[in-house]
Image: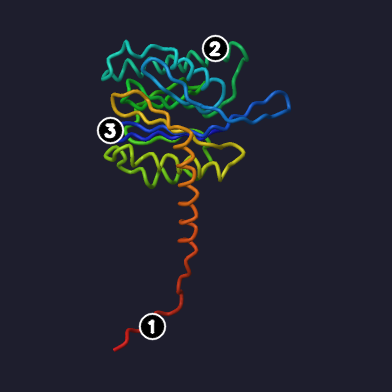
Amino acid sequence: MTLQVGLVGRDGIVLASDRLLQSYEGSSRSVSRTSKFLGGAGAICCWSGDSIAEQSAYGIRNHDWTIAVSNEIEPSRSTLMEIGNAACRKVEAQFGTVPGAARKVLTVLHRDQLWLLDISVQNGAVARPILDREVAGDTANTCRYFMNRYANWCNLRPIAELVPLAAYTILAAGEENPYGVGGLEVVVVPKGEVPLFLSGERERELESWFRETAKLIQRKLSDPFNYGPVAPPQS
């Protein structure tokens, strides 16, 4: 399981993901921390879901997106959908019928477009451009609230203001579900420029800021409230 967010700002795009990776072999489970981002020619993406989503992410990475014109939406949509459908066919050929699962790949194309590839074995892959914000993974995690509440009109805000919101959402999700979400990785894509991965030092800075901010919110929520009758004003 994972949680990932994408935010479109007026001057670029912010992608954030957790780093928790769970591997299963028979009845045993192992947990490690790793990057969930894949980058290629003209694209960078992160995936959530099963091996179909993972195969789709590798397909996006391996495709040469630099040959397409950046402002052409439909060719990008068609290519993403074919990559998702090809991943479905490949996995089904290996393992047979694959049960339903939430499979999504958040992708930045041409350094200025955020896309969501949503892959369904039953209905086929669907790709759509994201104009403001998107959340993928851990469908029951209530930390989606932060994106739903505070990312309104994010496309009018600079990406420097969106990094803390993206980081807070991921880290709070890890506190709610430490079994499935953990760690932080943030990628900033200034419009028209190459993706910038935040250093470990900057991510630790965000983690420290998150802890202090969470404590502040907790203190404010614990402020005593005088629920008794309001005293009449003195004449």
Q: Nearer the viewer, residue 220 or 48?
A: 220
Against 178, residue 51 (above or below) is: above
Give x and y (percent) for residue 140.
53, 41
Mark 3, residues whose alpha carbon is within 10 Å: few (<14), some, or many (≥20)? Answer: some
Give the spatial CA distance, label 3 vs label 1. 52 Å
Disc nearer the start of the sequence (2/3): 3
Amino acid type, mark 1: Ala
Against 92, residue 138 (above or below) is: below
Element type at mark 3:
loop
Amino acid type, mark 3: Asp
Amino acid type, mark 2: Lys
Give the spatial CA distance, label 1 vs label 2. 72 Å
Residue for point 73% across, 27% down: 27
Give the spatial CA distance, label 2 vs label 3. 38 Å
Describe residue 229's horizontal placement relative to residue 91 as left or right: left
Residue for point 43% across, 20% down: 39
In which image quadrant can residue 12 be found? Answer: top left
Element type at mark 1:
loop
Which residue is identified by label 2?
Answer: 90
Which residue is identified by label 1?
Answer: 231
Residue for point 40% across, 18% down: 80
Give x and y (percent) for residue 202.
44, 37
Give x and y (percent) for residue 4.
47, 34
Disc nearer the start of the sequence (1/2): 2
Against 159, residue 172 (above or below) is: below
Label pair 2/3, CB-CB below 8 angstroms? no
Element type at mark 2:
helix
Which residue is identified by label 3?
Answer: 11
